[in-house]
Amino acid sequence: MMKLLPSHHAHNIREVMRRWKLLQKSAGMRATMLLTIEGHSIFGFETQAAKAGAPAFYLSTGVHGDEPGSMWGLLLWAEKNIDKLQRDSFLLLPLLNPIGMRLNTRADHRGLDINRRFHLTDDPLTSAWQRWTAERPMIAAVCLHEDYDAQGCYVYELGHRQKSIGRAILTRYDGPIAVDPRSRIDGQRAKDGLIRRNKLPMHLAGMPEAIELHLRGCPLTLTFETPSEFSLGDRLVSQMRFISTALEVIGT
Ligand SMILES: [Zn+2]
């Protein structure tokens, strides 16, 4: 895997977007430009089935620029699954914070954490995201992230149903990085890598993407985190495996 990705490539956003453009062509996806920042365009891609209105599986990453494992994980998963993209309904946001990714910073080009701004109607990026997602029905959303405190992989689950889908996915997940064993993660109760939220956290300064999607009616949102102090190769393979397992369990 590391041959595919020399370490100096970790934050090479031009390479990442060049490969998404190739994927767009080979999978027949439609690209919508949400915003351009310092010459870097932020795209949302939709597959043919999504364009035709079939409820989509939503996959996004690159919200935080210091989390390259999830950006590469989504790209490499997509490159291995072109047939799926040609056939099934997907919405894909491969890099929401290009300047942060280039600079290896959590914050964006304004010094802001995008993942506290998804509720805002006057933010140029998240308001464009709101318009793009508004008309598009979803089966489930997976937001891919990394965490430098993590000791393994873990998942936040937010759903409108009682039964946990996150548990079923983690039981079948077989990535090279095991689940985080801690019973408290990020100040919240966790069990075998799963944090289920019944109540929305009130301490946040603004809305993360997953919570905003939940409030807008997405039936299931999962935020997957890999530990960013672990090896990049293992992190991106873990990200790819989580996406594949989530698709198997949820179905497209
Ligand atoms: Zn993150």
Image (cartoon, rainbow, N blue to C red):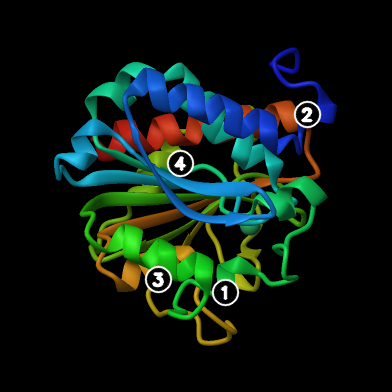
Left/right of residue 107 with respect to residue 30 in the rendered view: right
- Of tags 2 and 3, the one toward the viewer is 2
What crowding class fits label 2: few (fewer than 14 Cα within 10 Å), some (14-19), or many (20 or more)? some
Residue at x 52%, y 34% (from the top left corner): 74
Q: Which residue is mark 2?
A: 9
- Residue linked to disc 1: 116
**Marks 4 and 3: in contact by CB < 8 Å?**
no
For mark 3, what is the residue?
A: 212
Task: Judge whether 47 appears above or below 107 on screen.
Answer: above
Q: Earlier in the sequence, mark 2 or mark 3?
A: 2
- Kind of element beneath mark 2: helix
Residue 135 rendering spot, x and y as whole percentages: 22, 59
Which marked residue is nearer to the observer: mark 1 or mark 4?
Answer: 1
Secondary structure at numbered mark 1: helix
- Tell which circle, 3 or 4, labels the residue nearer the N-terminal end: 4
SS class of the residue under badge 4? Answer: helix
Counting from the top left corner in percent of width and height, residue 132 is at 34, 58
